[in-house]
Amino acid sequence: MLKIGIFSDTHRHVTNLSRAVDFLKGQGVSLFIHLGDDYTDPDEIGELDFVRVPGVFSNLYTEKEIPNRVVKNVVGWRFLLSHTISSHPNDLPEDLRPEDIIRGRRADVVLYGHTHVPEIKEEDKIIFINPGHLKNEDKRGFPPTFAFVELSIKRMLVRIYKLVDAAILIERTFRHD
């Protein structure tokens, strides 16, 4: 059983990211994913390795050696990591196009941020997870949140936690054939 922590849109709120990481480490999380805004925030936490992609307005988004989107196989599930759920005007010509990956069913799970709206949903047998944001306040009205995934070959448990009290905001379980 692999446990994953997922974050997006920390926007330099490194203390909040650190609190969320500490909570998830206590839950046995060993893989951490950051979906952009800001790409370098995890660097300030210390010793943890993050799989990450930059946000679409980051200066790093135009650096060809830093992938803007990543497809990663994790315990038999294909994950797409992207700051946005669809292509963006700031994309580089060689960037993977999320809509092509989704339409071609080349991912089982799409992890994205950008909207600051926490969400777990399934459409056409593809799971979409947005962990929300970790800003102190946000104009969209959602509190700071982050995601937890417990993954086996056949099952995925997804939770979105509120940072303030570690209460579960959304929880879903999915099966993998």
Image (cartoon, rainbow, N blue to C red):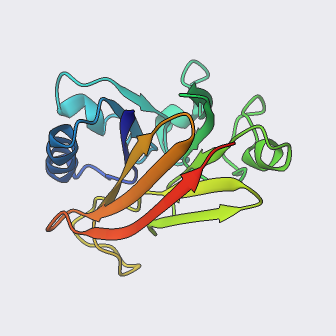
Q: Nearer the viewer, residue 14 or 172?
A: 172
The extreme bottom residue here reads: 141
Whether 117 is drawn above or below 48: the answer is below
Image quadrant of residue 48? top left
- The residue at the point 77 percent across, 60 percent down is 124
Foreground: 117 or 11?
Answer: 117
State which quarter of the image contains the N terminus: top left
Left or right? Give the position of 93 relative to 140. right
Q: Position of residue 146 (x, y in %)?
A: 33, 56
In what quadrant of the picture does the C terminus appear? top right
Left or right: residue 115 versus residue 30 is right
Q: Residue at x 78, y 33 (%)?
A: 93
Residue 40 in view, yes or no = yes
Name the quadrant containing residue 21.
top left
Residue at image x 50%, y 55%?
113
Res. 85 in view: no
| Total marks placed | 0
Where residue 121 sits, quadrant-wise, is bottom right
Left or right: residue 82 compared with residue 89: left
Residue 136 lies, in percent from the top left, at: 21, 66
The spot of residue 70 in percent (x, y) is 60, 31
Coordinates of residue 98 in the picture (x, y in percent): 73, 46
